[in-house]
Amino acid sequence: MTASSEQFTQVGLIGAGIQASRSPHMHEAEARANGLALNYQLIDLEQLGVGVEALPQLLNDVQAQGFAGVNITHPCKQAVIPLLDELSEEAAAIGAVNTVIFSAGQRIGHNTDCLGFAASFRRGLPDVAKRNVVLLGAGGAGSAVAFAALQSGVEQLAIYDTDAARVPALLDGLRPHFEAARVTAINDLASTITTADGLIQATPMGMANHLGSPLPLTLLQSHHWVAEIIYFPLETELLRHARALGCPTLDGGAMAVFQAAEAFRRFTGVTPDYERMLRCFAAMKES
């Protein structure tokens, strides 16, 4: 399907510390390739000097300005839910939204992170052991990744968050959809990682504005595989250390592309070319 060049679509991204996002270029380039005029605006809470409390007004503003929709990222993926009129089945199950569509005066929340991580994981780590896996992060991104990991064949998923109070809520959200025994909370991170096959990193730690590692790097061992959801920077401190140990690794680049492609489809009604978007992302990496 190719859109008319006369159609104009305005979309954006709401989040904190997002100036390094590659979403504007990916969406706008794919739109041009499909004959669609699209503008993608960054709405950065840090640049605006506001916090999550500004989200209701920001949504009001972009809806009033005729946006087709917005992507939502840290720290707003769960805070946005009470502000919406409807949730997709997947977003409701996950309890987090990363894409909001404005349609006929309604705000409809979707989650494309789950699809994005699952597609990236299949592509980047297709043959790794998935018996026991540790997930770091029980927030909005962690919720989507947990669903994707369990749907992708992870047998046992142990979840850790520095804010321990977040973990029970995520477990409660997962257990209606998966066998309860497949998901557990981590009490002792060090001992759990020792026996794990792999580690999925789904916290903001490692981003350009949250530099550092989400766990003591001494806990990593060469038999682990490590999957990261962050892509700016593409090589986080965690991934750099894991690669030095010889661990199989997956950066957040492909997840960023696949979730963006699905959001693009929902914004425009146009099915994107996934391989073209991957090449676009890779060209930005090289530039």
Image (cartoon, rainbow, N blue to C red):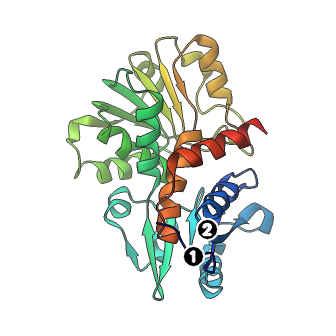
Q: Which of marks 1 and 2 is nearer the N terminus?
A: 1
Q: Residue at x 48, y 54 (%)?
A: 140
Mark 2 and mark 1 in contact (Cβ < 8 Å)? yes
Q: What residue type is labelled 2?
A: Gly
Q: What element carries label 2?
A: loop
Q: Which amino acid does label 1 sit on?
A: Ser
Position in image of residue 73 (x %, y %): 59, 58
Element assignment for label 1: loop
Q: Mark 2 points at which residue?
A: 35
Mark 2 crowd level (few <14, some 14–19, many ≥20, 10 Å Cα): some
Residue at 54% across, 18% down: 219
Tell me which residue sits at (71%, 55%) in the image.
Answer: 18
User: Looking at the image, is 244 positioned above or below residue 52?
Assistant: above
Taking the image as shown, residue 263 lies to the left or right of residue 7, namely left
Q: How far apart, in angstroms, are the residues tagged by discs 1 and 2?
A: 6 Å
Q: Is residue 176 left or right of residue 226?
A: left
Q: For label 1, count other residues whose C-alpha is less than 10 Å away and answer few (under 14), some (14-19) or many (20+).
A: few
At x 45% / y 56%, what residue is drawn? 112
74 or 70, which is in the foreground? 70
Viewer can see residue 153? yes
45 relative to 176, above or below = below
On the image, the x and y values in percent for residue 79 come to 52, 66
User: At which x and y percent is residue 284?
Assistant: 72, 43
Q: Name the residue under label 1.
A: 4
Quadrant location of the C terminus? top right
Query: Horizontal and vertical percent for residue 19?
Result: 76, 55
Vertically, is 27 above or below 174? Answer: below
